[in-house]
Image: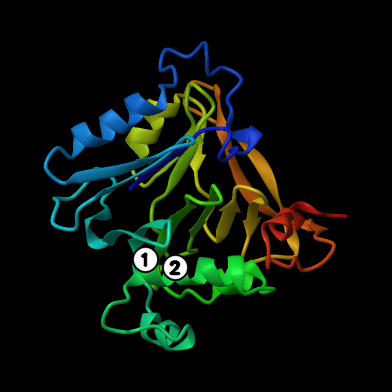
Amino acid sequence: MLAIFQKQVAHAPQELNSPRAGASPSKPRNPDEILRDFHAAHPAAAFSASFGGGAALACVGPSSSATATGTATYQRMFCGLDHIYCVFLGRLDNLSGLIRQYGLCGRSTNEAMLVIEAYRTLRDRGPYPADQVVKDLAGAFAFVVFDSRSGAVFAALGAADAGGTPVPLYWGVAADGSAVISDDRDLVKRGCGKSYAPFPAGCMFHSDGGLKSFEHPMNRLKAMPRVDSEGAMCGATFKVDTFTKINSMPRVGSAANWAAWDEAI
């Protein structure tokens, strides 16, 4: 899976930018180059959709061979409904229960469609705590949602599967400042140079509200600089800061409410 969002759509955390990004031999690439690399890596199975305003989503079909990241054991899905699009990787162990909870048709609802419905609930039928909605998703999963009408981006990575292993997911900053999200580490590394890192497990990202832990919603996240084998700064990982609390549980019934994620004392 691959998602690219230009700066006017979504701002990646500033901490992902490496101070040596421009001086590194592996300089970041532009979004078009990254998308071409994705198609070149999967010439027979990749497909993508580009949207006006600076967004692109891409996925590899379920019948493709194993990738370099070893994600062949996970389902890969791409779907859209009412101008909302979702790229999903992994599985939901409680899909049947969630289908009943959201009042959906079981025969036609897969994990990606369920995630779209969960996003619509947050957008239209709030107030619901976003962290609780994502926490209700049980299993090993990663997803990116793009609302082409509002321009909103919503992404999340489940903490782990039953064996304690999360779905692989990485993000970074392209040459033009675009946010890049993918399960293919090599693709993100080539496309973003030094400005990339693993997406933090147990966290969710919204284009208005930024990054937040859905497992520990009352705590802020702290950026921890990454250093590569050459001693160069290489993006940042994010950890829960147990000493910094959020003021209150944010409402999410409208786009303005997403911004309350970042309020802290």
Which colour style is shown?
rainbow
> What's the residue at 73%, 53% (across, down)?
259
Question: Residue 39 sits in which quadrant?
Answer: top left
Amino acid under disc 2: Val
Amino acid under disc 1: Ala
* Side (left or right) of 136 relative to 160: right
- Please rate how many residues cluster around mark 1, counting C-alpha atoms within 10 Å: few if below 14, some from 14 to 19, many from 20: many
Quadrant where the image shows the C terminus? bottom right
Return the residue nearer the eye: 222 or 151: 151
Vertical order, 172 against 19 (above or below):
below
x, y percentage for residue 218?
75, 65
Residue at which label 1 appears: 112
Count of numbered labels shown in the rendering: 2
> What's the residue at 65%, 40% (across, down)?
224
* Side (left or right) of 71 relative to 56: left
Residue at which label 2 appears: 115
Task: Evaluate whether residue 161 shows in this view.
Answer: yes
Return the residue nearer the eye: 52 or 79: 52
Vertical order, 113 against 142 (above or below):
below
Return the residue nearer the eye: 199 or 61: 61
x, y percentage for residue 140?
40, 66
Q: Are marks 2 and 1 in contact (CB under 8 Å)?
A: yes
Separation (CA) of disc 2 from disc 1:
5 Å
Task: Evaluate whether residue 226 shows in this view.
Answer: no
x, y percentage for residue 121?
56, 72
Vertical order, 167 against 36 (above or below):
below
> What's the residue at 18%, 40% (across, down)?
42
* Side (left or right) of 136 relative to 92: right
Task: Provide the secondary structure element on which disc 1 rests.
Answer: helix
